Image (cartoon, helix red, strand yellow):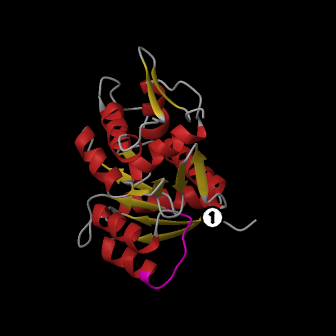
């Protein structure tokens, strides 16, 4: 089996060396860059990677800018994990809006990082050959991150896509806010946050509000359920 190729971009030499050695010991083919500009050159030269680990704050091109630019040019099939010393919900949301799949806060334990890396690689492998997910008349393209219902097509942010994907993969199930926070966002999120409700509202605006038949249902006191209407 070919080794998974991972790029790490971080301007802190000690972290770069620590992550590089750890991932290499786990059998990954690791490439490093000490700033965003050098990382972008690697992408522009056509070097393929299975996963990116990007520090948010780097000289030159920041991790957020690099993530956003990568998504615009190369799409959404490669998972991106952000390294950050920032811990507020707003800072995390900025990274997710830029196109990141996941994040980990410095300082971190290596086994937590490896668990995130493996989880994101597994998810990418599962979805690699599955181009379209469906629920009723809703179609979700895993390559372009577009959602289509009838004649309406909607572009989704990275986190909107991840939430809708999760709903579709678990359609018919009642999903609690805690479960969604854990599986779509991160287990360390403050469970008092209303971020799940905010993103459900975003999705409803795009895929439910224009239609009389709703797909995302509120289960009072329990959470949400995606279920296709019965004709």
Q: Is residue 65 above or below residue 171?
A: below
What residue is drawn where x is 47% and y is 55%? Answer: 148
What residue is drawn where x is 45% and y is 28%? Answer: 217
Image position of 31 (left or right of 91) = right
Find the magenta span and give its range. 44-51
Q: Is residue 72 above or below residue 152?
A: below
Asked if residue 108 lies in the magenta stretch, the reply is: no
- 194 or 107, nearer to the observer: 194
Residue 43: x, y in percent? 44, 78
Which residue is denoted by mark 1 in the rendering? 4
Q: Looking at the magenta stretch, what is its main secondary structure?
A: loop
Residue 80: x, y in percent? 45, 58
What residue is drawn where x is 41% and y is 62%? Answer: 16
Quadrant the C terminus occupies:
top right
Image position of 142 (left or right of 109) = right
Residue 92: x, y in percent? 30, 45
Residue 85 is at least partly visible in this image: no
Residue 74 is at least partly visible in this image: yes
Quadrant the N terminus occupies:
bottom right
What residue is drawn where x is 40% and y is 46%? Answer: 104
| Crowd class of label 1 (few under 14; some 14 to 19; many from 20; radius 10 Å) | few
Image position of 140 (left or right of 218) = right
- 72 or 82, nearer to the observer: 72
Residue 121: x, y in percent? 59, 54
Q: Give the quarter of the image for residue 214.
A: top left
Q: Give the quarter of the image for residue 154.
A: bottom left
């Amino acid at each position: 089996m070919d080794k998974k190729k991972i790029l790490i971009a971080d301007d802190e030499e000690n972290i770069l060396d620590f992550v590089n050695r750890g991932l290499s010991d786990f059998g990954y083919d690791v490439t490093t860059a000490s700033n965003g500009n050098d990382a972008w050159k690697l992408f522009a030269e056509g070097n393929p990677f299975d996963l990116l680990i990007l520090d948010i704050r780097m000289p030159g091109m920041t991790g957020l800018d690099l993530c956003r630019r990568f998504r615009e040019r190369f799409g959404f099939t490669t998972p991106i994990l952000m390294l950050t010393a920032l811990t507020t919900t707003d800072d995390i949301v900025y990274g997710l809006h830029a196109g990141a799949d996941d994040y980990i806060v410095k300082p971190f334990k290596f086994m937590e990082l490896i668990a995130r890396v493996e989880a994101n690689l597994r998810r990418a492998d599962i979805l690699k050959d599955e181009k379209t997910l469906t629920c009723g008349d809703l179609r979700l393209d895993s390559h372009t991150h577009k959602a289509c219902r009838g004649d309406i097509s909607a572009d989704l942010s990275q986190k909107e896509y991840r939430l809708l994907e999760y709903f579709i993969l678990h359609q018919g199930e009642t999903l609690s806010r805690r479960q969604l926070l854990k599986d779509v966002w991160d287990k360390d999120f403050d469970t008092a946050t209303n971020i799940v409700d905010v993103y459900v509202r975003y999705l409803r605006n795009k895929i439910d509000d224009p239609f009389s038949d709703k797909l995302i249902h509120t289960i009072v006191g329990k959470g949400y359920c995606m279920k296709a209407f019965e004709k």
